[in-house]
Amino acid sequence: MDETSAAVHAADPPPAASGPPSKAARNATIGFLVFLVVLSNLGNVLFASFVKEHPGWLIAMNASNRNLALASNNLDAAAFYLIGFARLFAPDLFFFWIGRWYGDAAIRWMERKAPTYGELLRQLEHWFDKARFVVVAIAPNNPVCLFAGAAGMSYGAFLTANVVGTIGRLILIRAFSSVFKDLLGNITSFIADYRWPITALSIVLVGVTVWSDRRGGRDGIGDLVHLEEGMAEAEEELGEEATMDASDAQQAE
């Protein structure tokens, strides 16, 4: 068992990974997450056209910090918090379920398919069992939500920490946008004035990112569609590592 997986078992053992409760639940989860990936890419493409005229739709598609900060001053507080919270929270429970369904294999799958998060997942082994509520509240992103599920964090604790963290993030971004209102307003106006060249550039950047990810063996939509195969490969890797560890231990005796 690798170090990251060992972290899951450092405190109270998590529930056994028994897989999704049904094919329908698995397919619904995958389908919804694929929809969010497509929506996020669409938000990147339409960013320049929507940032000033349709800020609510923009953050509904893609609630990145950049989009939230630029859209904030063009939305009333209720719209900003309601739409922003809904979009940020939307994938979290689903990644929590994936972690809960597949356990250590889910962590290995995330490490392999999102290498940039590998270091984050390795750091979680030092923090999570001592301060899991704080970790989720500070960074309620996809890998952390998946790790929380694999670690057996209770639904109540996870939801509370996630809601606190998500609202806190929105408050900070709203405050930042208010302080730098004039600067962000000028940036938004510039983007709106040059929306078509920026949109063309955005299309190129999204295309290059998707192509680069696929060349590197990563495909956000494909990885989700083939989730079962990916989890089977991760479980096989973990099984091989456990066998090797047991063999090494026997030789050391």
Image (tube, rainbow, N blue to C red):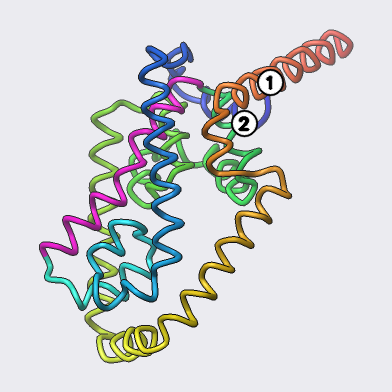
Q: Where does the image place residue 41, in percent across and percent down from the top left? A: 46, 57
Residue at the (35%, 40%) spot, across then down: 92
Q: Residue 250 got which mark?
A: none
Residue at the (39%, 32%) spot, across then down: 96
* Relative side of 136 to 74, left or right: right
* Residue density around tag 2, few if under 14, some if 14–19, many if 20 or more, within 10 Å: many
* Relative side of 50 to 76, left or right: right
Secondary structure found at label 1: helix
Secondary structure found at label 2: helix
Q: Is residue 219 above or below residue 85?
A: above
Location of mark 1 (residue): 238
Q: Is residue 118 above or below residue 239?
A: below
Residue range in magenta is 78-102
Q: Which secondary structure type mostly characterizes the magenta part of the structure?
A: helix
- Residue 121: image quadrant is top right
Q: Of the residues shown, which amino acid type is indicated by label 2?
A: Arg
Labelled pair 1, 2 in contact (Cβ < 8 Å): yes
Instruction: Inspect the magenta stretch and tell me whether residue 89 lies in it.
Output: yes
Instruction: Inspect the magenta stretch and tell me whether residue 24 lies in it.
Output: no
- Residue 191: image quadrant is bottom left
Q: Residue furthest right?
A: 251
Q: For the N terminus, which image quadrant?
A: top right
Q: For the C terminus, which image quadrant?
A: top right
Residue at the (39%, 67%) spot, across then down: 46
Location of mark 2 (residue): 108
Q: Of the residues shown, which amino acid type is indicated by label 1?
A: Leu
* Residue density around tag 1, few if under 14, some if 14–19, many if 20 or more, within 10 Å: some
Residue at the (31%, 51%) spot, across then down: 88
Q: Where does the image place residue 161, in percent across and percent down from the top left? A: 28, 42
Tag 2 or tag 1, which sits nearer the N-term?
2
Q: Where does the image place residue 237, in percent across and percent down from the top left? A: 72, 22
